[in-house]
Image (spheres, helix red, strand yellow):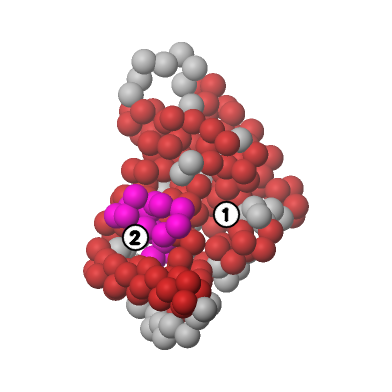
Amino acid sequence: MRESAILAAENSGAPRWTETNARRFGRKSLAASRTANNAFDECDDESLELRRARWNNLSAESTGERCSECGARVEGGNAGCEVLFNELGARDFSDPRYGATHELLVDAYCLQHPERYCRSAKSYAAHLTRMCCGIERGGKRETYAAIPRWLSGPAKIERPETRAQRGSLTIADLRSAQTPEEHAKLVREWAANVWQAYAPQHEIARRWLDAALRADDQQAKKRSRG
Ligand SMILES: [Zn+2]
């Protein structure tokens, strides 16, 4: 899963999982996550925000490691961050209660890791435009579907500059969720936070999304005529 998570997801139906990473970080990080979750068993009435803050402090104390791309405090640094993405992405497919926010999760993660997932102009445009669809246009299935069709056409895309500011929340913040509802709330907060960090590129994202919908419209008209 190097160039674009979208393309990878389309090819395989699920984020790719590497057994090597699983061996190195996955089980360990899963065990750490269980320990941390147990720490919250006694405080069910705590707010989600408070739990999240406690989680991050706990993680920082236990590992001191960060992902250099998104800043997440996560055991294993960059590789551990990717393991977390693969774990949560895979759970979206295996447990439908978590799947509703899958698109936002993938695009928020990829926009916070553009060196890996938005290297080409088209993969950059795919994630930025999808995020615009998810945040500003209600995340309609048919709108998402127009984006890869537009990108596989003759559209000329110039890659915007990689942003240094990518948001203050990260995928690590999702670990404090104890229910699918809390998870969905945190994914939406995280995605909105990342989208805000991309404010200087909102206009281009809106323009691209409109172009994708226009191209789709023209194709539909052509089909109905032909
Ligand atoms: Zn990261």
- Helix, strand or loop under label 2: helix
- Helix, strand or loop under label 1: helix
As drawn, 105 above or below 202? above
Classify mark 1 as within 8 Å of ligand 1 or not, answering yes or no. yes
Left-right relation of 113 to 51: right
Name the residue rendered at 39%, 51% in the picture. 139
As drawn, 159 above or below 141? below
- In the rendered image, which quarter contains the N terminus? bottom right
Query: Which is closer to the viewer, label 2 or label 1?
Result: 2
* In-front residue for pair 158/220: 220
**Tag 2 near tag 1, CB within 8 Å:** no
Residue 132, numbered circle: 2
Query: What amino acid is found at the position of numbered circle 1 in the picture?
Result: Glu
The residue tagged 1 is 82
Q: Position of residue 88 (x, y in %)?
A: 57, 43
Classify mark 2 as within 8 Å of ligand 1 or not, answering yes or no. no
**First along the sequence among labels 2 and 1:** 1
Name the residue rendered at 36%, 73% in the picture. 214
- Crowd band around label 2 with a 10 angstrom C-alpha radius: few (<14), some (14–19), many (20+): many
Magenta span of residues: 122-143
Q: Position of residue 207 (x, y in %)?
A: 29, 72
Residue 58 part of the magenta-drawn span = no
Left-right relation of 194 to 171: left
* In-front residue for pair 29/15: 15
Query: What amino acid is found at the position of numbered circle 2 in the picture?
Result: Cys
Quarter of the figure with residue 58: top left
Left-right relation of 212 to 203: right
